[in-house]
């Protein structure tokens, strides 16, 4: 299982995402109940919160982009 916080570069040194220039921190506030459910589900899926957020953000962005394409195609 990958913890989501570490990756192994070709050099063999372990680098945290925090120190990786290819990653940026994103933060925000959500209702406590949503945060708790998120943490519980991440744990039950053996997935880091970072991995789950990355997946959720990518899906949200794809949904928004698809919606924009659909609406612009309907305008034609």
Image (cartoon, helix red, strand yellow):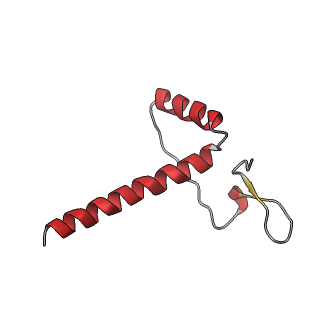
Left or right side of 66 for 48: right
Left or right side of 69 for 23: right
Identify the residue at the far left of this view: 76
At 64% across and 43% down in the image, what residue appears?
A: 47
Is residue 28 positioned above or below 73 on the image? above
Residue 17, picture quadrant? bottom right
Query: In what quadrant of the picture does the C terminus appear?
Result: bottom left
At 70% across and 64% down in the image, what residue appears?
A: 20
At 40% across and 58% down in the image, what residue appears?
A: 61
Identify the residue at the far top of this view: 33
Is residue 28 positioned above or below 74 on the image? above
Is residue 18 positioned above or below 38 on the image? below
At 61% across and 43% down in the image, what residue appears?
A: 49
Disc count in the image?
Answer: 0
The picture places residue 36, in percent across and down from the top left corner, at: 54, 29
The picture places residue 3, in percent across and down from the top left corner, at: 73, 47
The picture places residue 60, in percent across and down from the top left corner, at: 41, 53
The picture places residue 30, in percent across and down from the top left corner, at: 45, 36
Left or right side of 76 for 70: right
Q: Which residue is at the front of the view, 31 or 41?
A: 41
């Amino acid at each position: 299982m990958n913890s989501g916080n570490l990756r192994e570069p070709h050099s063999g040194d372990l680098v945290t995402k925090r120190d990786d220039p290819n990653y940026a921190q994103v933060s925000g506030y959500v209702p406590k109940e949503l945060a708790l459910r998120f943490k519980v589900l991440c744990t039950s899926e053996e997935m880091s919160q970072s991995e789950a957020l990355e997946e959720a953000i990518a899906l949200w962005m794809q949904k928004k982009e698809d919606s924009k394409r659909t609406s612009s195609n309907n305008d034609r």
